[in-house]
Amino acid sequence: MTGSWWPVAAIVAVVLATAAVGTLGVRSRTTSDFLVASRSVTPFLNASAIGGEYLSAASFLGIAGLVLTYGVDMLWFPVGYTVGYLVLLVLVAAPLRRSGAYTLPDFAEMRFGSPRLRLLSSVLVVLIGWLYLLPQLQGAGITLRVLTGAPLWVGAVVVAVVVSVTVAAGGMRSITVVQAFQYWLKLAAISLPAILLVGAWHRDGAPVFADGGWGTPLSGFGGREYPLYSTYSIVLATFLGTMGLPHVLVRFYTNPDGRAARRTTLAVLGLLSVFYLFPPVFGALGRVYTPELAGTSAADTVVLLLPGRVFGGWVGQALSSLVAAGAFAAFLSTASGLSVSVAGVLTQDVIRRESRFGGVALRFRLSTAIAVAVPLVLALVAGRTDLAQTVTLAFAVAASTFCPLLVLGIWWPRLTAQGAIASLIVGGGSALVAVVAVLTFGPFTGLGGALLDQPAAWTVPLAFLTAIVVSLRTRDRDPRAVAAALTRLHSPEELEPRH
């Protein structure tokens, strides 16, 4: 496959289409245009855009690689990524939209009226966004290297440049249409080859592979000594981390009202469920046709290599090119959503205070450059990591920070600003220490290694417990403001103020 022009042409087409739609589409002029598309996005369009940005490198490449290497235990990843939206629907979607906020820090300030909490929330949004951007850029580098033999940095730079141009041109208004298109492209790129691969497998007599523990649940995947703990920690991170991802939450601010936010979430559940049927197919069939990839650093490339291995000639070239286009669409759409959320926070909470940077458009574009540049540098200097593993660490940090803030802030009147701050510091600090340790010094062994590799099982309860204990020992300065904020979050649709 290396050196073929077919996948290169497909990637170039996706990049050009993304840049064209993003720069030639609806222009943005106001803060509301750039950050929340003037709150006018319809539920189905918004659901398609969420599917486009949520189905990242981990979904398109990483899940198949994990299933190839470790087997059925890894099916918890697509289940968790989807169920996270169900939890979001039940607990957060409509109240969050009623808050009228632009960003998570806006919500924190509306609910608690604390500048310190807003600042801390801003820092965590940026850190989570950068951590999630890292595997998107690394995945782009891996894809181009496998398909063309280019150095790893080329793909990362291409995605960073295209995303910067697209996001800076029109903010949320422009990337909404781009991401909706990219969801349907990714679905076609993963489903058509998967269906044809199953047909080819059946044609070949449905060959099977030696089990070797691959199909045994809780078999100690990856040589882990505590598989039960690791599995439950993955489940907790993916179930609760979705609501703390800044590029996901900002989408609910683009709906016209809370009712539309709920309909959007229901549509997202359907779209994600359909997509996640297909990556495990590549992982399972990879055991039959590309078993040499299992357990190696190339496992993430099974989606890219499998069609060419099974089908020869132009059919294999065409299917590999389609998969390559879908993979690059995954990198571009997720990176775009993350860049918008990080740039929005930087615009609202950092550069806004610097009047010399001019109007909102200039400030947003400067923020976009910063939002993309930092993870690009990290991608160029960081070591190679499993894409899904890195994304799961981002989920763990999100679940340990914004999940307690949102759930308790919406549903528990006793949560105080001091309790929320303590929860973010303790939960977020613990999860970030684990992330830095794993990415810098890992892998680790023993119980300590299991706790660091998958920290959500202890950092999330710790964050909730800290919030509750500190809140019970403190009190809000203005109970009337708390009552007003909760009334705004829970008031019936017909009484909601229009934003």
Image: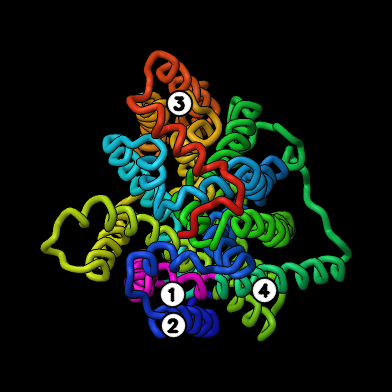
Image position of 475 with respect to 326: above or below: above
Rendered image: mark on residue 174: 1
Rendered image: mark on residue 25: 2
Residue 162 in sight in this render:
yes
Residue at which label 4 appears: 188
Comes first in the chain, label 2 or label 1: 2
Image position of 83 (left or right of 41) = right
Mark 2–mark 1 CB contact (< 8 Å): yes
Number of numbered markers: 4
- Characterize the magenta stretch by its predominant secondary structure: helix
Seen at 40% across and 27% down, the residue is 479
Real-space Cα distance between discs 3 and 4?
45 Å
Mark 3–mark 1 CB contact (< 8 Å): no
Position of residue 421 measured from the top left corner of the image (x, y, whole percent): 35, 29
Closer mark to the observer between disc 2 and disc 4: 2
Q: Nearer the viewer, residue 122 or 394?
A: 122
Seen at 21% across and 56% down, the residue is 352
Position of residue 329 measured from the top left corner of the image (x, y, whole percent): 52, 71
